[in-house]
Amino acid sequence: NGYYFLFVTNGGLSAAEGYQMRMFRSAKPDGPYVDGMGRSAIFDNYVMNYGPNADTRGQLIMSAYAGWGFMKTGELAQGHNSVIAAPDGRSYLVYHTRFNDGSEGHQVRTHQLYLNQEGWLVSSPFEYNGGTITDEDIASKEIVPSEQIAGIYHLLVHSYALNYKERQVVTPVKVELHADGTVDGAYRGTWSIEEGTGYISIRL
Protein backbone atom coordinates (compact mmCIF):
# COMPACT_ATOMS: atom_id res chain seq x y z
CA ASN A 1 0.00 0.00 0.00
CA GLY A 2 2.89 2.35 -0.74
CA TYR A 3 4.78 1.83 2.53
CA TYR A 4 7.75 -0.08 3.82
CA PHE A 5 7.42 -1.42 7.37
CA LEU A 6 10.10 -1.71 10.04
CA PHE A 7 9.51 -4.17 12.87
CA VAL A 8 11.43 -3.84 16.13
CA THR A 9 11.36 -6.17 19.12
CA ASN A 10 12.17 -4.46 22.43
CA GLY A 11 13.28 -6.22 25.60
CA GLY A 12 14.74 -9.67 26.17
CA LEU A 13 13.50 -12.99 24.85
CA SER A 14 13.01 -14.91 28.10
CA ALA A 15 9.56 -15.08 29.67
CA ALA A 16 10.33 -12.38 32.23
CA GLU A 17 12.35 -10.00 30.04
CA GLY A 18 9.62 -8.10 28.23
CA TYR A 19 9.96 -9.06 24.56
CA GLN A 20 7.45 -6.94 22.60
CA MET A 21 6.94 -6.25 18.88
CA ARG A 22 6.46 -2.72 17.58
CA MET A 23 6.19 -1.28 14.08
CA PHE A 24 7.17 1.83 12.11
CA ARG A 25 6.69 2.70 8.43
CA SER A 26 8.16 4.86 5.69
CA ALA A 27 7.39 5.79 2.11
CA LYS A 28 11.03 4.96 1.26
CA PRO A 29 12.98 1.80 2.13
CA ASP A 30 15.79 3.79 3.78
CA GLY A 31 13.43 5.88 5.90
CA PRO A 32 12.70 7.98 7.79
CA TYR A 33 10.56 5.49 9.70
CA VAL A 34 7.87 6.80 12.06
CA ASP A 35 4.94 5.47 14.08
CA GLY A 36 1.31 6.56 13.89
CA MET A 37 2.05 9.65 16.01
CA GLY A 38 4.92 10.68 13.73
CA ARG A 39 7.61 9.68 16.23
CA SER A 40 10.91 8.54 14.76
CA ALA A 41 12.16 4.98 15.13
CA ILE A 42 15.55 6.48 16.04
CA PHE A 43 16.12 7.19 19.74
CA ASP A 44 18.29 10.26 20.25
CA ASN A 45 18.41 9.81 24.02
CA TYR A 46 18.13 6.97 26.53
CA VAL A 47 14.53 5.85 27.07
CA MET A 48 13.28 2.67 28.76
CA ASN A 49 11.33 1.05 25.93
CA TYR A 50 9.82 -1.95 27.74
CA GLY A 51 8.58 -2.91 31.17
CA PRO A 52 6.32 -1.13 33.71
CA ASN A 53 7.54 2.35 32.69
CA ALA A 54 7.83 1.72 28.97
CA ASP A 55 7.47 4.55 26.51
CA THR A 56 4.90 4.20 23.74
CA ARG A 57 7.03 4.76 20.64
CA GLY A 58 6.12 2.42 17.78
CA GLN A 59 2.81 0.79 16.89
CA LEU A 60 2.31 -2.02 19.42
CA ILE A 61 1.44 -5.23 17.56
CA MET A 62 0.46 -7.18 20.67
CA SER A 63 1.37 -7.45 24.33
CA ALA A 64 1.36 -10.32 26.80
CA TYR A 65 -2.22 -11.56 27.13
CA ALA A 66 -4.35 -14.37 28.54
CA GLY A 67 -7.96 -15.51 28.80
CA TRP A 68 -8.54 -14.90 25.09
CA GLY A 69 -10.86 -17.34 23.32
CA PHE A 70 -9.95 -20.90 24.25
CA MET A 71 -6.44 -20.12 25.45
CA LYS A 72 -5.42 -22.35 28.34
CA THR A 73 -2.26 -20.38 29.15
CA GLY A 74 -1.38 -16.81 28.30
CA GLU A 75 1.15 -15.72 25.68
CA LEU A 76 4.04 -13.50 26.69
CA ALA A 77 7.44 -12.39 25.40
CA GLN A 78 6.28 -12.39 21.77
CA GLY A 79 8.87 -11.28 19.26
CA HIS A 80 11.74 -12.13 16.91
CA ASN A 81 9.25 -11.91 14.08
CA SER A 82 9.15 -12.09 10.32
CA VAL A 83 6.42 -10.82 8.00
CA ILE A 84 5.48 -12.57 4.77
CA ALA A 85 3.72 -10.76 1.92
CA ALA A 86 2.36 -13.90 0.27
CA PRO A 87 1.35 -14.55 -3.36
CA ASP A 88 -2.22 -15.19 -2.16
CA GLY A 89 -2.69 -11.44 -1.54
CA ARG A 90 -2.46 -11.77 2.24
CA SER A 91 0.26 -10.90 4.74
CA TYR A 92 1.33 -13.03 7.68
CA LEU A 93 3.12 -12.31 10.95
CA VAL A 94 5.36 -15.17 12.13
CA TYR A 95 6.81 -14.87 15.65
CA HIS A 96 7.75 -16.91 18.66
CA THR A 97 6.05 -16.71 22.01
CA ARG A 98 6.56 -18.01 25.50
CA PHE A 99 3.74 -18.76 27.90
CA ASN A 100 2.47 -17.65 31.28
CA ASP A 101 2.94 -21.10 32.81
CA GLY A 102 6.22 -20.67 34.69
CA SER A 103 8.32 -22.34 31.98
CA GLU A 104 10.68 -21.10 29.26
CA GLY A 105 9.07 -23.26 26.60
CA HIS A 106 8.21 -21.47 23.37
CA GLN A 107 6.34 -22.02 20.13
CA VAL A 108 6.17 -20.34 16.74
CA ARG A 109 2.83 -18.73 15.83
CA THR A 110 1.39 -17.28 12.62
CA HIS A 111 -1.28 -14.54 12.52
CA GLN A 112 -2.72 -12.90 9.43
CA LEU A 113 -2.09 -9.16 9.08
CA TYR A 114 -4.62 -6.70 7.67
CA LEU A 115 -4.33 -3.10 6.49
CA ASN A 116 -6.59 -0.66 8.31
CA GLN A 117 -7.98 2.50 6.69
CA GLU A 118 -4.88 4.48 7.69
CA GLY A 119 -2.63 1.96 5.96
CA TRP A 120 -1.22 0.40 9.13
CA LEU A 121 -0.83 -3.35 9.51
CA VAL A 122 -2.85 -4.87 12.35
CA SER A 123 -2.70 -8.46 13.55
CA SER A 124 -5.69 -10.77 13.59
CA PRO A 125 -6.65 -11.73 17.16
CA PHE A 126 -6.20 -15.48 16.66
CA GLU A 127 -3.71 -17.78 14.95
CA TYR A 128 -4.10 -18.22 11.20
CA ASN A 129 -6.18 -21.32 10.42
CA GLY A 130 -6.91 -21.03 6.71
CA GLY A 131 -9.02 -17.89 6.56
CA THR A 132 -9.59 -16.40 3.11
CA ILE A 133 -10.38 -12.70 3.75
CA THR A 134 -8.03 -10.26 2.01
CA ASP A 135 -7.42 -6.53 2.39
CA GLU A 136 -9.22 -6.04 -0.92
CA ASP A 137 -12.28 -7.82 0.47
CA ILE A 138 -12.36 -5.54 3.52
CA ALA A 139 -11.96 -2.39 1.42
CA SER A 140 -14.64 -3.32 -1.11
CA LYS A 141 -17.52 -5.07 0.65
CA GLU A 142 -19.32 -5.50 3.95
CA ILE A 143 -17.88 -8.72 5.35
CA VAL A 144 -20.62 -8.82 7.99
CA PRO A 145 -23.95 -7.05 7.38
CA SER A 146 -24.10 -3.93 9.56
CA GLU A 147 -27.38 -5.04 11.19
CA GLN A 148 -25.58 -8.12 12.57
CA ILE A 149 -22.74 -6.25 14.26
CA ALA A 150 -24.53 -5.04 17.40
CA GLY A 151 -23.89 -7.35 20.35
CA ILE A 152 -21.64 -8.20 23.28
CA TYR A 153 -17.93 -8.59 22.55
CA HIS A 154 -14.79 -9.52 24.39
CA LEU A 155 -12.31 -6.66 23.95
CA LEU A 156 -8.57 -7.13 24.41
CA VAL A 157 -6.61 -3.89 24.94
CA HIS A 158 -2.89 -4.53 24.57
CA SER A 159 -0.55 -2.58 26.87
CA TYR A 160 2.89 -1.08 26.32
CA ALA A 161 3.70 -1.03 30.03
CA LEU A 162 3.53 -4.39 31.81
CA ASN A 163 5.46 -5.85 34.74
CA TYR A 164 7.23 -8.60 32.83
CA LYS A 165 9.24 -9.76 35.83
CA GLU A 166 5.92 -10.73 37.40
CA ARG A 167 4.73 -12.14 34.04
CA GLN A 168 1.86 -9.67 33.95
CA VAL A 169 -0.69 -10.12 31.15
CA VAL A 170 -3.75 -8.24 29.92
CA THR A 171 -7.10 -10.02 29.84
CA PRO A 172 -10.28 -9.30 27.87
CA VAL A 173 -13.19 -7.25 29.13
CA LYS A 174 -16.79 -7.12 27.88
CA VAL A 175 -18.27 -4.29 25.87
CA GLU A 176 -21.60 -4.01 24.07
CA LEU A 177 -22.02 -2.40 20.67
CA HIS A 178 -25.58 -1.11 20.38
CA ALA A 179 -27.53 -0.70 17.15
CA ASP A 180 -27.66 3.09 17.73
CA GLY A 181 -23.86 3.34 17.41
CA THR A 182 -23.06 3.61 21.12
CA VAL A 183 -20.75 1.40 23.18
CA ASP A 184 -20.94 0.61 26.88
CA GLY A 185 -19.70 -1.96 29.36
CA ALA A 186 -16.06 -1.86 30.48
CA TYR A 187 -15.60 1.10 28.08
CA ARG A 188 -18.01 3.72 26.77
CA GLY A 189 -17.90 5.29 23.35
CA THR A 190 -19.25 5.07 19.81
CA TRP A 191 -18.86 2.82 16.78
CA SER A 192 -19.63 3.10 13.08
CA ILE A 193 -19.13 1.13 9.88
CA GLU A 194 -18.14 2.64 6.56
CA GLU A 195 -20.94 1.62 4.24
CA GLY A 196 -19.95 -0.85 1.55
CA THR A 197 -16.73 -1.87 3.32
CA GLY A 198 -15.59 -4.02 6.21
CA TYR A 199 -14.03 -1.05 8.05
CA ILE A 200 -15.39 -0.45 11.55
CA SER A 201 -14.32 2.54 13.66
CA ILE A 202 -14.64 2.31 17.44
CA ARG A 203 -13.91 5.27 19.72
CA LEU A 204 -13.69 4.48 23.42
Image (spheres, rainbow, N blue to C red):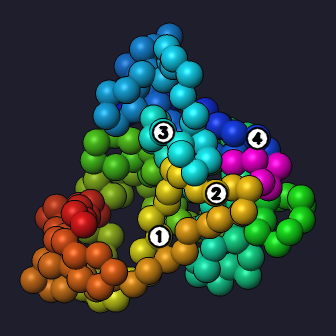
Q: Residue 111: horizontal and vertical position, in percent? A: 61, 57
Q: Residue 181: horizontal and vertical position, in percent? A: 13, 77
Q: Residue at x 28, y 42 (%)?
A: 118
CA gap, disc 4 and disc 3: 16 Å
Disc 3 crowd rating (10 Å Cα; few below 14, some 14-19, many 20+) is: few
Q: Indicate which label's residue lies in the foreground, 3 or 1.
A: 3
Residue highlighted by disc 3: 55
Q: Type of residue at label 2?
A: Asn
Find numbered disc 4 in the image and state the secondary structure of the residue it sits on.
loop
Q: Indicate which label's residue lies in the foreground, 2 or 4.
A: 2
Find numbered disc 3 in the image and state the secondary structure of the residue it sits on.
loop
As displayed, is residue 174 above or below residue 201?
Answer: below
CA gap, disc 2 and disc 4: 13 Å
Residue highlighted by disc 4: 12
Please give the label number shown on residue 156: 1
Q: Residue at x 39, y 47 (%)?
A: 115
Of label 2 and label 3, which has the lower sequence position? 3
Disc 2 crowd rating (10 Å Cα; few below 14, some 14-19, many 20+) is: some
Q: Is residue 9 magenta?
A: no
CA gap, disc 2 and disc 3: 13 Å
Q: Residue at x 23, y 83 (%)?
A: 184
Residue highlighted by disc 2: 163
Res 35 quadrant in image: top left
Magenta region, residue range: 14-18
From the viewer's perspective, is 109 left or right of 203? right
